[in-house]
Image (tube, helix red, strand yellow):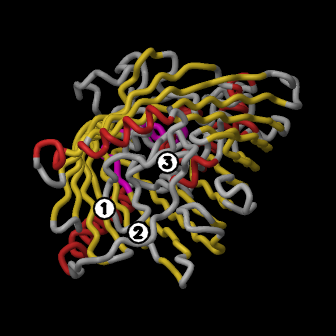
Amino acid sequence: MSALRSPSSYAAHVHRLLAATTMVWCVLPVSDAQAQYRGPVSRSAPLFELDTPTSFANTPFTPKVENSVEAWGTLVRKLNEKGIGIVVDYTSESAIALDTAHAGDAAYAHQIGAELDLDWGRLVGWQGLRTHAVFVNRAGHNLAADLGDHSLNGYQEIFGSGGDVGVKLVYVYATQNLLRNHMQIAMGKMPVNIDFANSPLYCVFMNKSNCGVPKSLTRNDAGFATYPGSVWGGRVRYWPDSGVYAQTGVYGVNPDLNTNRYDRSGFRMGTSLYTGVYVPVEFGWIPSFGKNHLVGHYKFGVAYDSSNYPDLYFDTDMNSAVQSGKPHRQTNGKTQLWLEADQMIVRHGDGPLHGTYILAGMTRGQENNSPYGFQVFAGLVDRGFFKRRPKDTIGVEWSETFASSSLIAAQWERYRKGDPLPGNATYPQSHLMTLEATYAFQLYKGVSVQPDYQHIWRTNLQRNKPQVDVIGLRLHAVL
């Protein structure tokens, strides 16, 4: 087991990177950078318009959406002028298995979302201050569970945390712009993934493995709180010049987030179950190439969680816990890395998504106390390919996720002894691969319909599981 590594070297890297972040903020020049061409925004995603940087701009006051009910849309636009933003939408995702012993099994899940944004500059004259809150109702069933898959894979990304709760508070936080809009601070109860390791392109797809953020990040670390869960925290983002940014934050770590032990409804505000702090750092570059404004988004991030986690292989004496029967040793802290990129290569029109984007990325987890070692993915998203259907979106994505070496070693020892395996596994886990093809077309203003196809290899990361074909359908409507 010499390949298994101590977390100390990872922590040292994080501390150096945090120091480097501070130095970058101090030495890079501040200039009146001009706003770049607006980057990708997923109009069909259930996350509305995320904070994740898509241009030289701070958190928008309220998402720009098409309203399906014109009278309501007219009212909303009038409220926007006064500093009040309201978005109400509905998303459903249905899926049916085409093969395996569960052929014909189907599942439906939905989310009804409501967003309230307030611009306090327009309301009371406090310039640069905005507050944001989102509430959802989620209900339905998870097809992946029917197939014995309890990994990060899921055929309906809308299903999950906060399900079967009448009203769930997703987040409530404030942002303040400073230094002529070169800096923004955010504080409140919020997910980590609205800012870090994110791209609106990812939620073009229905499979849960990448929507919002690569799910190996959230499943590897309780500190990476993800929508619709939120924790108390703060974030600061700095734009030293047009096209580049740096951001960091500090968030509480709640291993019981979205569970009945804590509060599935999201309204509990206490921190008694927090186990540490989660500190992400991200650097990004957003270039725009040529006369057609071919926008790209490139980001590198690292994060450190100060909480204690059990070692997946070693006991307190640094021997195999499976063989000795002794308790697993506790490790202090864990580190994550991510590298992500997307680039528009062809433009079809003037809109932010009107063109062909290629995307790719990878994540890295800490092998000794994280269930997933790394994840890699690549894809293509195109909007406006057909001139007569300028708002239709086509997507193809491939993703592969690998279990950590420590988890694999421990599971093989359990399997040979005849002991039960964690994670609902019936065979030692190794890796999982997904391929998805999807097409979203606008049925009516503010209403889209999206047929979807997914092929899964090694369900639940198990070699003994058959390949699965799934047909899905997403419906999205904005009031």
* Marked residue nearer the N-terminal end (2 or 1): 1
Q: Amino acid at mark 3?
A: Leu
Q: Position of residue 197 (x, y in %)?
A: 46, 55
* Marked residue nearer the N-terminal end (3 or 2): 3
Camera-nearest label, 3 or 1: 1
Q: Amino acid at mark 2?
A: Gly
Q: Which residue is mark 1?
A: 247
Distance from label 2 to label 1 (Cα)?
A: 9 Å
Q: Which residue is mark 2?
A: 284
Please name whichever residue, 366 or 227, is drawn nearer the observer in this view of the structure. 227
Asked if residue 284 is positioned above or below residue 3 in the image, the reply reads below
Please name whichever residue, 282 or 84, is drawn nearer the observer in this view of the structure. 84
Q: Position of residue 256 (x, y in %)?
A: 39, 26
Q: Which residue is mark 3?
A: 217
Indicate whether residue 304 is drawn in magenta. Answer: yes
Asked if residue 414 is positioned above or below residue 394 in the image, the reply reads above
Residue 10 — which label? Answer: none
Distance from label 3 to label 1 (Cα)?
A: 18 Å
Q: Are marks 2 and 1 in contact (CB under 8 Å)?
A: yes
Q: Amino acid at mark 1?
A: Gln
Q: Magenta part of the protein: which range?
A: 303-320
Q: Position of residue 174 (x, y in %)?
A: 23, 43
